[in-house]
Amino acid sequence: MTAEQNPFVGTWQLVDCCALTEDGGRLPSPLGAKVLGQIMYDDAGNMSAQLMAADRPRFSSRSPEETPAAEFKDAFLSFTSYWGTYRIDRAAGTVTHTVTGANAPSWPGSEQLRYFALDGRRLTLKTPPIRGRDGRKLVQVLVWEKL
């Protein structure tokens, strides 16, 4: 499938990221108020995504062996990365990412469903309702702009 046939193909930069509550409220992303990210789709059905808090602090040591465990935990919680394959269901308005590898050990082998909307060079991806870290049901919304 060519880029003309598949508008997902290409590299996209994150331009907005938030969580919506059940009552329609808008919260910052779990990664923070300012998030950097990139997602890539190719015409062979492969994808990769990386997101991180823009204000991630540097480790206190240049050596990973000397970095305190608490800093590793904070670094893990402020970064998400995964790759795999994808398939689009245009009729349902969904894209499914089948995860091959990820920084979260529970994600490989999983399918991550996203509802999508394309508007020119903008791609909006929304999760189904998921439980946030505080237990509330949230919909994560990521808006990407094609590079």
Image (cartoon, rainbow, N blue to C red):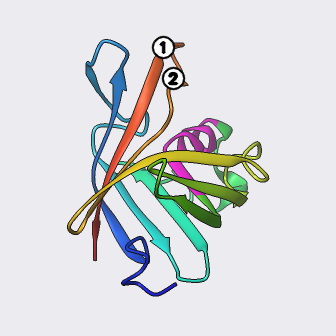
Q: Main secondary structure of the magenta part?
A: helix
Please give the name of the residue rendered at 52% of the width and 84% of the height, measured from the top-left corner: 1
Please give the name of the residue rendered at 61% of the width and 57% of the height, measured from the top-left corner: 97
Q: Amino acid at mark 1?
A: Arg
The total of numbered circles placed on residues is 2
Please give the name of the residue rendered at 61% of the width and 47% of the height, measured from the top-left corner: 112
Residue 92 image point, x, y percent: 49, 47
Q: Quadrant of residue 120?
A: bottom left
Q: Quadrant of residue 130?
A: top right
Q: Is residue 1 above or below residue 68?
A: below
At label 1, counting other C-alpha atoms closer than 10 Å, the crowd grade (few under 14, some 14-19, many 20 or more) is few
Q: Which mark is residue 136?
A: 1
Label 1–label 2 contact, CB within 8 A: yes
Magenta range is: 70-81
At label 2, counting other C-alpha atoms closer than 10 Å, the crowd grade (few under 14, some 14-19, many 20 or more) is some
Residue 71 placement, left or right of 31: right
Residue 111 placement, left or right of 136: right
